[in-house]
Image (cartoon, helix red, strand yellow):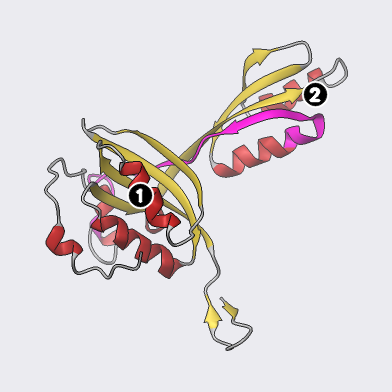
């Protein structure tokens, strides 16, 4: 917490929040969700979308920057969207997350061996070999991906493509006791609803801040 320069009141620092949203496979769902954040000028740092275990439903995982209260309000707004089935705030759960990055690194006869050795330390996989460049694929959490990129930077990064983070809550209803969660069993450990009835009445109770 930091003090506001004018009022002296405490202001919660902004930080990254990892959120997953289960949505129906309908046209323009992605546009509506990103527009919801855009209207409030919140920056989506990364975004990944893919199919789920349920046909007709997709999972969007995104990282958004803001303070805790702002992100909670944003999640309430997401719940109001008819095409949104389930919202998961991963900061409230134990989760596993991964990213993938492709990095093309400049090499020479003098640096080729050293670059390969560093890549081996990170368990990076070579996916393309050229006379003057090697392209690596690395999968891991955010820290690992960032560390690998920084290790390769002194050699000369020619191109890079980094996916957004994807995440799943750890465990299951069977192996995580309900007393772990003070307010009862975690909603993120409940199977995603396959029924898709709109929740207009519930949505009307949430103040429209966007």
In magenta stretch: residue 210: no
In magenta stretch: residue 162: yes
Q: Nearer the viewer, residue 201 or 146?
A: 201
User: Which disc, if any, is residue 114?
Assistant: 2
Point 34% across, 59% down: residue? 75
Q: Secondary structure at mark 2?
A: helix
> Quarter-wise, where is residue 115 in the image?
top right
Q: Looking at the picture, does residue 46 appear above or below residue 74?
A: above
Point 64% across, 30% down: residue? 160
Q: Are marks 1 and 2 in contact (CB under 8 Å)?
A: no
Q: Looking at the picture, does residue 6 appear above or below residue 158?
A: below
x and y percentages locating residue 53 in the rendered image: 25, 32
Point 56% across, 43% down: residue? 142
x and y percentages locating residue 206 in the rendered image: 24, 68
- The answer, for residue 160, to whether it is visible in the render is yes
Q: Looking at the picture, does residue 162 appear above or below residue 188?
A: above
Q: Nearer the viewer, residue 104 or 124?
A: 104
x and y percentages locating residue 70 in the rendered image: 42, 67
User: Which disc, if any, is residue 33?
Assistant: 1
- The answer, for residue 186, to whether it is visible in the render is no
Which quarter of the rendering shows the C terminus? bottom left
Point 77% across, 10% down: residue? 131
Q: Which residues are magenta?
A: 151-178
């Amino acid at each position: 917490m930091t003090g506001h320069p004018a009022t002296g009141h405490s202001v919660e620092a902004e930080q990254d929040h990892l959120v997953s949203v289960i949505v129906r496979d309908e046209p323009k769902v992605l546009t509506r969700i990103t527009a919801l954040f855009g209207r409030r000028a919140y920056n989506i740092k990364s975004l990944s979308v893919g199919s789920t275990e349920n046909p007709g439903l997709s999972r969007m995982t995104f990282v958004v920057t803001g303070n805790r209260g702002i992100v909670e309000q944003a999640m309430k707004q997401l719940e109001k969207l008819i095409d949104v089935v389930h919202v998961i705030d991963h900061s409230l759960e134990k989760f596993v997350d991964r990213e993938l990055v492709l990095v093309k690194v400049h090499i020479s006869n003098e640096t080729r061996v050293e670059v390969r050795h560093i890549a081996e330390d990170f368990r990076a996989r070579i996916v393309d070999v050229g006379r003057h460049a090697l392209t690596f694929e690395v999968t891991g959490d955010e820290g690992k991906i960032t560390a690998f990129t920084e290790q390769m930077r002194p050699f000369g990064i020619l191109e890079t493509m980094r996916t957004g983070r994807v995440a799943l809550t750890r465990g299951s209803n069977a192996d995580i006791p309900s007393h772990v969660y003070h307010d009862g069993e975690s909603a993120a450990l409940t199977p995603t609803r396959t029924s898709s009835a709109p929740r207009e009445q519930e949505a009307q109770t949430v103040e429209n801040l966007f």
